Amino acid sequence: MVKRGGTAVEDLQSEIWRMQLQSDIAGLLNLLRHKSANVRARAALALQVMGANAAIPSLQMALMDETDPSTRRLFIAVLDDLFQLALENDAELPPYQHHPIVSLIDQLSGQSHEQIIRAAQQIGERGAKIAAETLVRVFENTELPSRVRLTAAEALLKLDCAPVEVSLLAALRHPEFQVRRSAAGVLGQLKAAWAVDALIAVLTDPHDSVRRMAQAALQRIGTPEALAAAGSSEPSFPPPPALHVPPMEEEDTRPAPPLPDDVS
C-alpha cells in the first residue's frame, strides 16, 4: 500500500474504518491474514462492531492459524460475541447459556492431541454445526495422527456435515454388506490412513467378503499399524487381472497362387 504521510499500518487502520463504514466484510476478512497482528486484531474488531455473523467461518480459520497470544484472545472474544448474536437471531441453534463452542474451537488448534480429540467429541455431541468447518480443517490436516482425524470425522458425521471422503466412514456401518464392502474398498484405493482404526473394526464384520476387503484395504494403505492389523509385514497388492489374448492363427506357408495374366 502506498504511504500517505504515515506508516503502512496506520494507512491500513484508516482503510479498516472505511471498510467498516461501507460494510466491506470481504475486505476485512482478507486483513485477517495480514502479517501485522495489530491489523488482524483491528479487522476482527471491525467485524465485531458490524455484527458480521457471516465472518464466523473465516474467523474460526483465522483462530486456528493465529500464533500471537493477544490476537488469539481477541479472536476468541469476537467469535463469542458473534456466536451469541447468531444464537439470538437463529431459533434453530441450541440455546447455550454460556456458549462453550468458542473455547472448543480454540482447543482444536492446540498442541495436545488428547485435547483436540476431546474438543471434537464435545462439538459432535453438542450438535454444534457452527464449528463444522473447523472440524473439516482438523480432518484434512495430514500431519495429525489418524486417531485424531478419525475423531474429527466421527464428529462431522454427527453434525451431518461430512465431506464425501468422511461419508465412507458411515458406509462402513451400512446394514447391507455390499455397501460396507464397497466403502472399505474405496478407502483402500484412497489410501485413507485416517480410517485405519475404522477398517480394523471391520475385520470382525460378520460377512467374509467385507472382512477380506477391509484386510486388502489395510494392506493397500500400508502404514505400520495397518499392515500389522492386516497380518502382513509389507503391502501385498492383488495381481492385475490376466488379459485375454486370442490365439494367433498359424502362418500359412503354402505358396501364393499365381496372379492372372494381364488382360490387354
Image (spheres, rainbow, N blue to C red):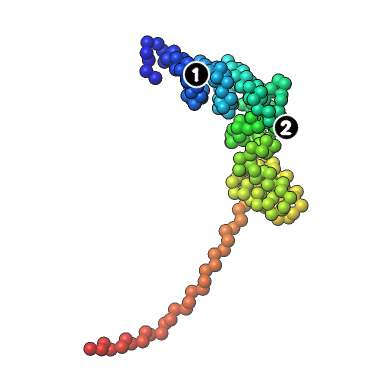
Residue 245, image x and y in percent?
52, 69
Q: Please state which amino acid type lies under the numbered disc 1.
A: Gln
**Label 1 neighbourhood size at 10 Å, few (<14), some (14-19), many (20+)?**
many
Image quadrant of residue 105?
A: top right
Q: Is residue 156 above or below residue 212?
A: above
Residue 46, image x and y in percent?
53, 18
For the N terminus, the image quarter is top left
For the C terminus, the image quarter is bottom left
| Residue beneath the point at 37% across and 84% down | 256
Residue most extreme to the top: 5
Question: Is tag 1's residue or tag 2's residue first in the polypeptide sequence?
Answer: 1
Kindly identify which residue carries mark 2.
125
SS class, disc 1:
helix
Image quadrant of residue 148?
A: top right
| Residue beneath the point at 47% across and 16% down | 17
Residue in the foreground of this view, choosing between 131 and 169: 131
Residue in the foreground of this view, choosing between 245 and 59: 59
Kindly identify which residue carries mark 1.
20
Disc 1 from disc 2: Cα separation? 36 Å
Q: In this view, does 145 lie above or below 216?
A: above
| Residue beneath the point at 60% across and 32% down | 133
Residue most extreme to the left: 264
**Label 2 neighbourhood size at 10 Å, few (<14), some (14-19), many (20+)?**
few
